Image (cartoon, rainbow, N blue to C red):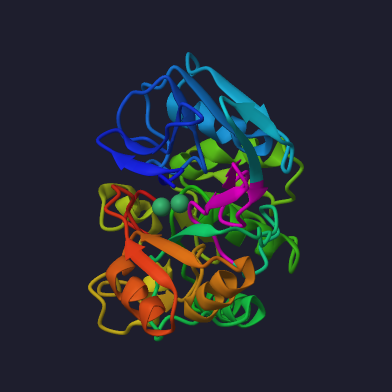
Amino acid sequence: MADLVTLTPEGLYCQQGGFHIDPWRPVPWALITHAHADHARRGAGTYHAARSGVGLLQGRLGPEAAIRGHAFGKPLAFGDVTVSFHPAGHVLGSAQIRIAAGGEVWVISGDYKRDPDPSCETFEVVPCDVFVTEATFALPIYRWDPIDRVMAALLGWWDANAAAGRASVLFCYALGKAQRVLAEIGVRTDRRVLVHGAIDALLDAYRDEGVALAPTTPVGARVRGESYAGELVIAPPSAFGSPWMRRFGDAGTGFASGWMRVRGNRRWRGFDRGFVLSDHVDWPGLLATIEGTGAGRVLATHGYADTLARYLREVGLAAEPLETRFDGEAEDVE
Ligand SMILES: [Zn+2]
Ligand SMILES: [Zn+2]
């Protein structure tokens, strides 16, 4: 039997359904897993996505983009195949895409994680024959700490800087990570957090979906010359070292990313503190998920796809890497 999903110059393609998944070139029908720039690109005729992510997608693709939102789990007919969206736990509205035809089921995971995240829907294990998985952190060294430990370290760092009369500037990806941190802060304290404009622009899409975030103020709304001592500021990595930083004076700087697991990583340098926090699945979560799906064949995208495919073949699964154009936790992408 021919593969239900194949790789074409436009991206992942389901011929029987007539649609592409997260295509990187213009196509008539695009099914989108989530709103990150490497998965949601402009130029498709019609987009289909999980309903709770439509606000973020519209912001990414522009007001003229035609986007149809669908409830999680609802079966949709495309040509000869049945499609449904299932939560991926990566960012708000992120979805795995289940494709069924002729008794065979494929699941395209997009990006996903298994750790709890109050800012998005919880990952659902979807049984399938073929699982297309991301492999951003597919090495045994990548294991995430419990979120309580990460947040205790982050809040402790904020307190220590405040006691020293300094601001704390935390850098993290503007879409997903920033809102996750704001949601986690919101369940632990009612303190106000200052946010960079690029992050502020994405908060309404979360609050409109009922996600509770810590109270925020855009940095741009502050009076010139007002002190930032004791404040926590959240900003995208691109703002690090930019003139925008000058207003904070001698601030403590931190970076929240899965890459912080490896000391000496080039992304670590220059920041005072690293917090290991990722919106991607870690190594144990990846293996547990693959096993949970019951898939006999696995196709790996992102990052360590070759390593993961080799490992899976050694344990008896059919596995290959897929040469897609998706990035991992690349700077300013996620
Ligand atoms: Zn992503
Ligand atoms: Zn990705």
Task: Determine whether, in the image, residue 117 is placed left or right of residue 199.
Answer: right
Q: Where is residue 270 in the image (x, y as percent from the top left)?
A: 26, 72
Asked whether residue 129 appears in the rendered view, the answer is yes
Write the residue at 61% across / 75% down. 151
Q: Position of residue 262 (x, y in %)?
A: 33, 82
Closest to the observer: 83 or 278?
A: 83
Q: Position of residue 58 (x, y in %)?
A: 53, 26
Instruction: Inspect the magenta stretch and tell me whether residue 92 lies in it.
Output: yes
Residue 240 sits above or below residue 222 on the image: below
Q: Which corner quadrant of the image does residue 288 belong to?
A: bottom right
Which segment did they paint magenta?
Answer: 86-113
Task: Determine whether, in the image, residue 244 is placed left or right of residue 210.
Answer: left
Write the residue at 66% across / 58% down. 126
Closest to the observer: 25 or 171?
A: 25
Asked whether residue 221 appears in the rendered view, the answer is no
Q: Where is residue 219 in the image (x, y as percent from the top left)?
A: 49, 45
